[in-house]
Image (spheres, rainbow, N blue to C red):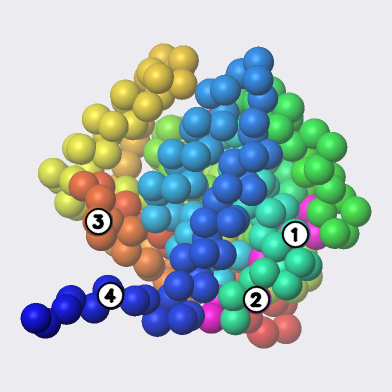
Amino acid sequence: MKRELPVVAPPSQAACDAAWKALHRAACAVYWRRADRWPWFWARGKLGRDPLFRGLIERGDLPPGARVLDLGCGQGLVAALLHTAEALARQGRWPQAWPAAPWARSYTGVELMARDAARAQAALQGLAFGSGAAPQVVCADFRAAELPASDLVLLLDVLHYVEPAAQDALLWRVRQVLAASGGPGRLVMRVADATDRRRYAIGQWVDRLVTRARGHARPPVWGRPLAAWTAQLQALGFAVRPVPMSRGTPFANVLLVADLAAPGGAR
Ligand SMILES: C[S@@+](CC[C@H](N)C(=O)[O-])C[C@H]1O[C@@H](n2cnc3c(N)ncnc32)[C@H](O)[C@@H]1O
């Protein structure tokens, strides 16, 4: 009788899966609180199911050693991910098949909603990166907040919450901050492509549900076609690399990795 052999993943794939599992578990543990379990559940679901986070790690989208500014940071998932990635790499548990582990020289999150900012602060309290810096989260509106010196700015599922003039003003300020950093700068931004009407509408609908589940009233939103986002960033001098994010999801999401050359020209 012919025996079916089990399907075995190639060693590097298995190592990557195991590393992601460890990274996911440890990043979620940052949020474990007996008194408020929601942040842990949220981290588990969001880091585990949204292809954004593993993709950021596996493509090496977060340059090592950056001063990170996370605008609309929610409960600061990227800070937890960065802290955990650095710890795993130090323990020699970073798979060779992945790009170098990201680590943050500093991290500042800006979050409008007091409850989310408080959850981020509670979870990240007491953590420190290898640089000695502790992740900071401030409760503020990024339209008015002062933006600290940064080499990496994140706008992950955020920009559609503010009106088009404020989107443009913020992108211009982000460009100024990155240009002032002296080296090459990067903006990583996830948007929904309004051209793909059906998937865009599904995203809006889910956004509405999630915003309500997180205890907030649903604000109005302003989307744009992908080509318009890209053109806006290019007009500001960014070289833009779009990364499709909709595969395996019903959404029209695209990640834009936008690089600004250093003043001398190096990128
Ligand atoms: C969909 S969540 C994404 C959270 C986080 N970037 C992530 O990927 O986990 C969007 C976040 O942006 C925040 N936000 C919206 N408008 C903002 C503003 N004007 N200033 C600061 N944060 C804002 C919301 O409160 C919310 O937490």
Label 1 beta carbon within 8 A of ligand 1: no
Residue holding disc 2? 100
Tell me the CA gap for discs 1 and 2. 13 Å
Numbered disc in front, either 1 or 4: 4
Q: Which residues are magenta?
A: 97-106
Q: Of callouts 2 and 4, which one flags the residue occurring earlier in the amino acid sequence?
A: 4
Residue placed furthest toward the front: 1
SS for tag 1? helix
Label 2 beta carbon within 8 A of ligand 1: no
Quadrant location of the N terminus in the rendered image:
bottom left
* Mark 2 crowdedness (10 Å alpha carbons): few <14, some 14-19, many ≥20: some
Rendered view: 186 above or below 169:
below
SS for tag 4? loop
Rendered view: 208 above or below 153:
above
Residue holding disc 4? 7
| Residue at 53% in and 81% down | 97
User: Can residue 208 be seen at all in this image of the molecule?
Assistant: yes
Tell me the CA gap for discs 1 and 4. 32 Å
* Mark 1 crowdedness (10 Å alpha carbons): few <14, some 14-19, many ≥20: some
Residue holding disc 1? 87
- Left or right: residue 265 versus residue 212 is right
Label 4 beta carbon within 8 A of ligand 1: no
Q: Of callouts 4 and 3, which one flags the residue occurring earlier in the amino acid sequence?
A: 4
* Mark 4 crowdedness (10 Å alpha carbons): few <14, some 14-19, many ≥20: few
| Residue at 68% in and 73% down | 184
**Mark 2 belongs to which amino acid?**
Ala
Residue nearer the viewer, 123 or 241:
123
Label ID, residue 248? 3
User: Can residue 69 be seen at all in this image of the molecule?
Assistant: no
| Residue at 68% in and 39% down | 30
Numbered disc in front, either 3 or 1: 1
